[in-house]
Image (cartoon, grey):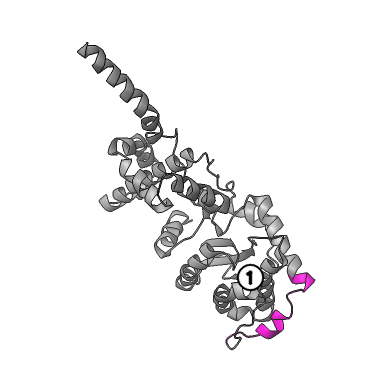
């Protein structure tokens, strides 16, 4: 009788825990890249799904992420460690680099599980484009750009002044361009978050006008546009003391030529596989999502010719 009771208890525990255990231990055949995770998280639809799922678990998304993180074991990290180590063997100079790589694996496992539980398919980054191949496909005749065309690095950025991640990245990009002024050829391309809305195009249209009127001050104009883009889109009055040509350009928001340039960039980007902002292309490598100073330095190191 005791044995029967014990057997029933074991079966009950197996059935009640089996599904949960399987879900917690989900491991994809291969881990998504950090870029693909950023691309997936850049979707407002996906963020809404993730927040809704987290709420159903009695947590916010940050709490859910930390909870999943605590469940990732060293054994699970080791599942991918050997492959990652071989792939990046020339980029692991010390134990700090090893720790960063293992932590990257941990977080990619975490997001894989969260996306899996939310039934979200991870977006893939745009296809690889070689330096010569991509640049021949871009129309840069009227695009804001800085630096020598034969520079060590070519950086193409697709962004929108109404994009929060773009605004967060801009100061670091600006500092990078100042630091490597003679070694980077930078090209700015427009990608409106809402290309169907006339109001959402206004900051980009103003940007086109400012570049045409005074290209030497464009980095300052970019900074001001990020600070005031929402006011511009709403048609609100803003101070123009530091804006050369601003009054003239604000009157050009319905200028068909500037709008056509913005829309042409948008259509061009979609054909290349760009679907969110910010997106960067650096010497053949696609970089998706917000970047800080440290990440930018790693990107330059990884794309060094």
For the residue carrying disc 1, how many other residues have a C-alpha within 10 Å: few (<14), some (14-19), or many (20+)? Answer: some
Percent from the top left, x then y, of residue 96?
28, 53
Task: Give the camera-side residue of 46 and 106.
Answer: 46
Is residue 252 rendered magenta in the image? yes
Q: Quadrant of residue 247?
A: bottom right
Residue at 49% in and 41% down: 118
Residue at 58% in and 61% down: 156
Above-or-below relation of 216 to 19: below
Residue at 61% in and 84% down: 243
Could you tell me which quadrant the N terminus lies in? top left
Residue at 30% in and 48% down: 98
Classify mark 1: helix, strand or loop: loop
Q: Quadrant of residue 4?
A: top left
Residue 89 appears anywhere in the view = no
Percent from the top left, x then y, of residue 16?
36, 27
- Identify the magenta region: 242-258
Above-or-below relation of 275 to 116: below
Residue named by callout 1 = 144
């Amino acid at each position: 009788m005791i044995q029967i009771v014990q057997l029933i208890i074991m079966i009950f525990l197996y059935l009640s825990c089996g599904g949960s255990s399987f879900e917690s231990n989900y491991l994809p055949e291969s881990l998504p890249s950090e870029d693909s995770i950023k691309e997936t998280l850049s979707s407002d639809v996906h963020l809404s799904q993730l927040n809704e799922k987290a709420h159903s678990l009695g947590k916010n998304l940050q709490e859910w992420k930390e909870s999943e993180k605590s469940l990732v074991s060293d054994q699970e990290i080791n599942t991918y460690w050997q492959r990652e180590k071989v792939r990046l063997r020339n980029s692991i100079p010390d134990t700090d680099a090893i720790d960063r790589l293992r932590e990257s694996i941990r977080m990619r496992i975490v997001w894989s599980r969260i996306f899996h539980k939310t039934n979200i398919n991870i977006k893939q980054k745009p296809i690889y484009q070689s330096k010569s191949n991509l640049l021949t496909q871009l129309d840069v005749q009227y695009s804001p750009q800085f630096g020598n065309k034969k520079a060590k690095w070519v950086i193409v950025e697709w962004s929108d002044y109404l994009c929060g991640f773009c605004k967060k990245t801009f100061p670091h990009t600006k500092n990078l361009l100042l630091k490597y002024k003679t070694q980077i050829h930078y090209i700015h391309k427009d990608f409106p978050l809402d290309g169907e809305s006339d109001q959402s195009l206004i900051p980009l249209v103003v940007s086109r006008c400012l570049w045409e009127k005074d290209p030497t001050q464009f980095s300052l104009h970019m900074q001001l546009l990020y600070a005031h883009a929402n006011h511009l889109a709403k048609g609100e009055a803003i101070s123009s003391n530091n804006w050369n040509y601003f009054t003239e350009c604000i009157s050009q928001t319905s200028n068909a030529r500037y709008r056509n340039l913005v829309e042409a960039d948008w259509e061009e980007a979609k054909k290349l596989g760009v679907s969110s902002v910010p997106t960067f292309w650096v010497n053949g490598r696609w970089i998706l999502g917000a970047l800080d100073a440290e990440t930018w330095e790693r990107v330059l190191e990884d794309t060094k010719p």
